[in-house]
Amino acid sequence: MKRTRRLAVSTKATVNIRRLMRDLNAIGRIGIGDRGSVTRLVFSIKELRSRQLLIHLMRQAGLKIHIDAIGNIFGRFEGSDPRAPAVLAGSHLDTVIHGGKYDGPVGVIGALEAVRTINEHNIPVRSPLEVVCFVGEESSRFGFSTLGSSLVAGEVHPKDLTNAVDPQGTKLADVLSSLGIAQRNMQGLRRSPKSLKAYLELHIEQGPILETKGKRIGLVTSIAAPSRFKVIFKGQADHSGTTPMDMRKDALVAAAQLVEYIEKVCRKYASMAQGRVVGTVGAMKIEPGVINAVPGRTELSIDIRGTSAQSKNRVARMVKEQARTIARQRAIGVEVLNIREENPVPLDKRLLRVSRELCDEKGIDYEIMPSGAGHDAMQMAKITPAGMIFVPSKRGISHNPLEWTDPADIWLGAQLLMETMIRVANEKL
Ligand code: GLV
Ligand code: MN
Ligand code: MN
């Protein structure tokens, strides 16, 4: 199917694709590595540089900048009623290890471009507009996702931080306290729901549905949420040459059994009716981790997600139980460390309707769909109406250097975001 590269829009103003792609590419060069991969782990120098570039771009755009204690950046554009609650739009700039350049930045730079266009074309808006970059959406460093937006939503609880430690042993709680954020003032970052009218996030789909169906826009109904935990098997490190097979306490074989079990049980709960459960062991530490020693200790980082809280929680419970069974059968130790337990989040139907009406008016073919990936919108939905717009990912690939979205689709997504922001800022929800 040949795509129309430009579509008519309700406002005459169109977002500037060249400027949008220029800024996306500038952000994408920060942390660039092998095969065009991008790595900007939260609180790394690269991630801080991307935030500095954003501050520079926001200043150039004339936005009033506010940075909170964790480093979330808000760039405000006043509407005609400064006391009206703000329409917030954005996403994140941190990435996974060896990720792509669009997961996150499309939402931040897309929102910035929307506000720049509104400003240049003197489009009247009643509510203030705020562009936001949330810190630490990805869980790749501490196993803890949506850090900045969770703080803004008042959703970080000290118990959640207990087991959030990076591979070098740095504790997230220590990083927070070095930034002046401790148990006693954690709620201080919470944004008053009264100050917000809505939160909107443009994001790449990170899955294959839109491309498969030939749709250019996804309107998101809900976000699947994860249960995250670690399982540690404690066997015994022994000489690989001298220890007979029947006398080993091999922690890696136990881990392998659990990995296989996770695949099996998640396949059982994989259908839409069963709650679209997916499970992943994305990281594993093996100790001592040498060729000539029986592994004495393994630590598995486990992520179970689903669109039904009940199915997801059931699978998480089954996996923990199976870990104990395996340890018992192999006469080794086991420990389960919970990281974070979240529930699937519905997004706001009224915001979806605004974007859907715009698509209908313009003849844009859209798909109404849930999100399997996590997003800052799932935290923001707890304090304000939240909506998300997806654009297609080539071959559904994401968290991978091959992540790619057609610039024409990024343009269309940013355009729809801008028009949705204008309507939401001017109309009663
Ligand atoms: C965010 O990218 C996630 O892990 O869903
Ligand atoms: Mn991601
Ligand atoms: Mn993302």
Image: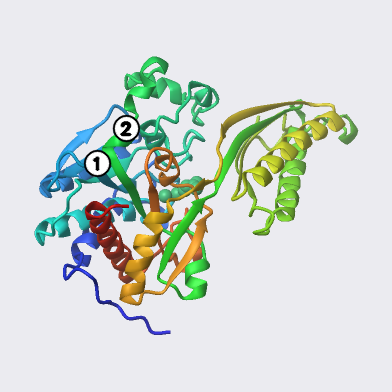
Q: Quadrant of residue 72?
A: top left
Q: Disc 1, disc 2: CB below 8 Å?
A: no
Q: Amino acid at mark 2?
A: Arg
**Tag 1 secondary structure:** loop
Residue at horizontal 72 percent and vertical 32 percent from the top: 295
Looking at marks 1 and 2 on the same chain, the residue that comes earlier in the sequence is marked by 1
Query: What's the CA distance linking mark 1 and mark 2?
Result: 12 Å
Q: Nearer the viewer, residue 199 or 85?
A: 85
Residue at horizontal 24 percent and vertical 54 percent from the top: 26
Q: Quadrant of residue 366?
A: bottom left
* Residue placed furthest toward the right: 246
* Residue placed furthest toward the bottom: 2
Mark 1 neighbour class, 10 Å CA radius: few under 14, some 14 to 19, many 20 or more: many
Q: Is mark 2 within 8 Å of ligand 3?
A: no
- The percent position of residue 93, horizontal first and vertical second, equals 33, 45
238 left or right of 406 in image: right
Q: Quadrant of the N terminus?
A: bottom left
360 left or right of 315 in image: left
Q: Amino acid at mark 1?
A: Pro
Vertical placement of 17 versus 226: above or below? below
- The percent position of residue 288, horizontal first and vertical second, equals 65, 29
Mark 1 or mark 2, whichever is nearer to me: 1
**Tag 2 secondary structure:** loop
Residue where numbered disc 2 is placed = 191
Residue where numbered disc 1 is placed = 85
Disc ID at residue 303: none
Mark 2 neighbour class, 10 Å CA radius: few under 14, some 14 to 19, many 20 or more: some
